[in-house]
Amino acid sequence: MTRVVERSDLEAMHARVRAEAPGGSHGLFGPGSVTWDVGAEGICLAAGGRAALMQVALPAVAKSIVEHSAVRHGDVAGRFQRTFANVYAMIFGRLDDALAAARHVWGVHRRIVGEGYHANDPDSLMWVHATLVDSAVVAHETFLAPLSMRRKRAHYEETKRFAWLFGIGPRGGCCGGACPRRIPGLPPAYGGRRPTSTPAGASPVGRGVTSWVAAVSASSSPCCRMQA
């Protein structure tokens, strides 16, 4: 970890979001976007569980959760409900609300600091972003229907705006956790990162997340759609 996303980095990327997003009530993506189509499916809640398991495979993320998150007190469901309430507000909400929510998250992340981690570390932010994007596509293709390569590429390009909300810059931009240019599968598309840690289910954090994933999977229907 060499640096973190500073407020100036965040605002620089927010300026780019304002320049490229539909804006207003259409927010980051708008009607007709692949991101709205994929994100509207209720099965994305299960995708969030998959993403969470992948996230805690990165030691810095796992340690920050153990030392700072409500998960350590057993509130696994509450933690992820709050997280994904924010995520959906950013994906489907008005642009000003999405930007305000991102600033709030950045402020919370400033306090999540410990030995070997900082929640505003761009590499950790990039990994969390990558797991969310990949898991949404995997869930859609597993439970609903395949996405064409054209739609996958569109989804990938659209969701860069979501990364920018958190100050993750494009290659050559503000921060080291840059959005890569290519898509053909998660590891090469995201810099070949294969985080090393204990298996997700072997740690207290992993066991808690696994229990939440099982509960969500049991109650989710592939036919359920979120109200956008």
Image (cartoon, rainbow, N blue to C red):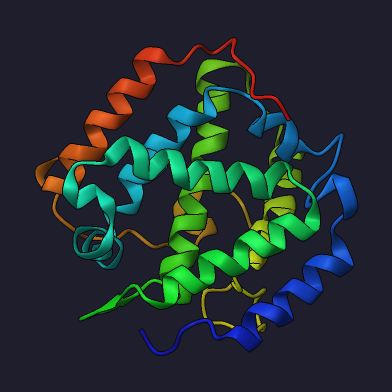
Q: Residue at x 39, y 71 (%)?
A: 119
Q: Is residue 98 visible?
A: yes
Residue 107 image point, x, y percent: 50, 73
Q: Residue at x 50, y 21 (%)?
A: 142
Quadrant of the rendered structure where residue 37 is? Answer: top right
Residue 133 appears left or right of 225:
left
Residue 184 appears left or right of 11:
left
Quadrant of the rendered structure where residue 64 is? Answer: bottom left
Image quadrant where one finds the N terminus: bottom left
Q: Is residue 14 above or below residue 144?
A: below
Tell how many labels. 0
Q: Residue at x 65, y 88 (%)?
A: 8
| Residue toward you, 139 or 190 | 139
| Residue toward you, 134 or 186 | 134
Image quadrant where one finds the C terminus: top right
Residue 196 appears left or right of 138:
left
Q: Is residue 133 visible?
A: no
Q: Residue at x 52, y 74 (%)?
A: 177
Q: Is residue 87 above or below residue 123?
A: above
Residue 108 image point, x, y percent: 45, 69
Residue 63 image point, x, y percent: 21, 64
Residue 129 image point, x, y percent: 52, 56
